[in-house]
Structure formats: structure tokens, C-alpha cells
Image: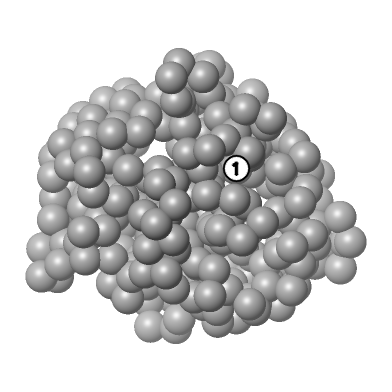
Amino acid sequence: MVRLLCVLGHGYELLPHFIDHYSKYVDELNFVLYESELTPRIVNRSKPIINSYDNCKILGIVRERVYDWEKVTILYNMYKNKKKNDWWIIADIDEFQLYPKNSLDKLVSSCDDNLWEIARGGFIDRIGPNGEFSILEKETPIFKQYPHAGFFRYPLSNACPNKVSLVRGDVEITNGQHYAKINGHTTWRWQGWEHPSIAPYQTHSVQVHHFKWDDTSIKRIKSVADLDQPYAFSKEYRKMYDELRRRDFRLNIRKRDFMFSKCDKPDFNSYKNWNKLIRKIISI
């Protein structure tokens, strides 16, 4: 069985888009609801939406400090470890994955055949028309709402662009869900890309389309920065906020370093800069 796990602490508005996207790929979508001082109503707002789908489950509800990304990773590890032998898609609410050959089944089968336990991938940043942080609409397909796909978060803030996308339940993932830890070693750079437990990046990398950048994201980025705490990676968020403010909160979609390409449908082959981008990601 292939299950999805999402720790949901904000962005309940994305749930219908998120569930619709992943229902095409996984057998079951599992959620852990993360309440905090800033999101005290996340359970009341998200629970009715999740419960309206037969293939969705709420595994747990927690109340923790604001933006504790380390705790989020602990929750991902704890809950997927309950089904050690199953495959798990690890996805935050704003992460929409696309798979090689547009088939998760083929990716899982290839991993099973070759005894790989992890498939990794990289972030593709999504932005609205003309580089704007636009309002999320309920009815319009999300890939059409944010049609420009590129790579701007790392250039602006040095945020890690790597992602553990598909993983066996008993494999430990590290903070931010960026890497795995195998036999005490983090699968970073030379320890990871050629690791025998990881599917080859050249043919098995997953695209993680990051729909983080809507009209609510600026306020959220600033609040993480203002928190000024290591566990929230506040310095990274401060750098991102300052860079966006310097650009008047609009991105230049013609800037070559950002590798933008119009990509308005959920098709793995639609983003034309993918091969170039994944080579860059593995060099970081």
C-alpha cells in the first residue's frame, strides 16, 4: 500500500486541491493536525474537509509551539513508522509531487524491484501570473492559478531544495524532510545521491511543485522571521523576506537564474528546465 502523510499546521484552504491531486496516486491520505498559538482553529477548519473524503484519515492532533519544524519532522517519523513496510509519500500541504513517466506506480515498482527504500527529488517554486503572490481560488485548478514554475527560493534565501519524497516507513528522515538518515549517516551530497538505498536521481527524481507562494505567504514568512528562533530556521526566513521586500514582493519571471517556465498542468514533462534544475540541486 502507498500512503501519504501530511502534517498540517496552516493552509487548510489548499486541502481540496491537495486531496484531489494525490487521490490519483495514493491509496490513502493521512493527516496530523498541528495546532499552535497562531493557528488555534486549524482543527475546526480542516477536520470537516478531510472527513468528507472516504480516502482521508486524521491520525492525530497535536498542539505545539509556533513553527517548530523540528517537531514536525518528529511527527512525520513517528507516524510513518507505525507502518514500517509501507511506502509513504511525505508532503506538506503546499507540496504537489509529480512523478517520472507521470506514474507513481511505476516508481514504486522500480524501487521494489531494485530494493531501493527512498526516492528523492527537488523543489520547483510556483508563482502567480506576472510573478505575483496571488490569491488562491477554490474552483480553478491550482497549476493554472500559479502557472510559472521556477527556482527562486534557494537563490534568495539558501533554503535547501532537496526533498525526501517517497520512503519506506522505517527510514528516518531529517529536519525539513530534506534528507534521510541511514546507519547514522545523513544522506547529504556524496553520502546520498549515489547511496545504494536511494533510487538514481537521473531517472527516478520526483518534482515537488511548491505552491507556498500565494498572497498569505508574505505575512507568514515575516512571522517566522520575527520569531527569531533556530528551530524555526528564522534566519533563512528573514533573508527571504528581505529579498522579497527589496523586489516589491513581485518576482521577475524573465530572470534567467530563476529558470522560469510556463507549466500550467500537472504533467511531469511540462516543466522544460527540469533536467537542468535537478543537476543544479544535486550540486548544492
Q: Quadrant of residue 205?
A: bottom right
**Which residue sits at x=46%, y=56%?**
95
Q: Which residue is mark 1?
A: 162
Camera sees residue 261: yes
Quadrant placement of the C terminus: top right
Coloration of the structure image: one colour
Q: Quadrant of residue 103?
A: bottom left
Q: 90 or 101, which is in the foreground?
A: 101
The x, y position of residue 279, in whole percent, is 76, 51
Q: Residues within 10 Å of mark 1 (few under 14, many from 20)?
A: many
The x, y position of residue 3, in whole percent, is 25, 56
Direction from residue 168 to residue 53 in the image, left or right: left
**Which residue sits at x=28%, y=72%?**
23
Direction from residue 172 to residue 54 in the image, left or right: left
The x, y position of residue 39, in whole percent, is 30, 40
Quadrant placement of the N terminus: bottom left
**Which residue sits at x=44%, y=52%?**
114
Figure check: 93 above or below 227: below
Q: Secondary structure at mark 1?
A: strand
Camera sees residue 227: no
Direction from residue 178 to residue 108 in the image, left or right: left
The x, y position of residue 21, in whole percent, is 37, 72
**Which residue sits at x=28%, y=34%?**
170
Q: 5 or 68, which is in the foreground?
A: 5
Figure check: 29 above or below 10: below
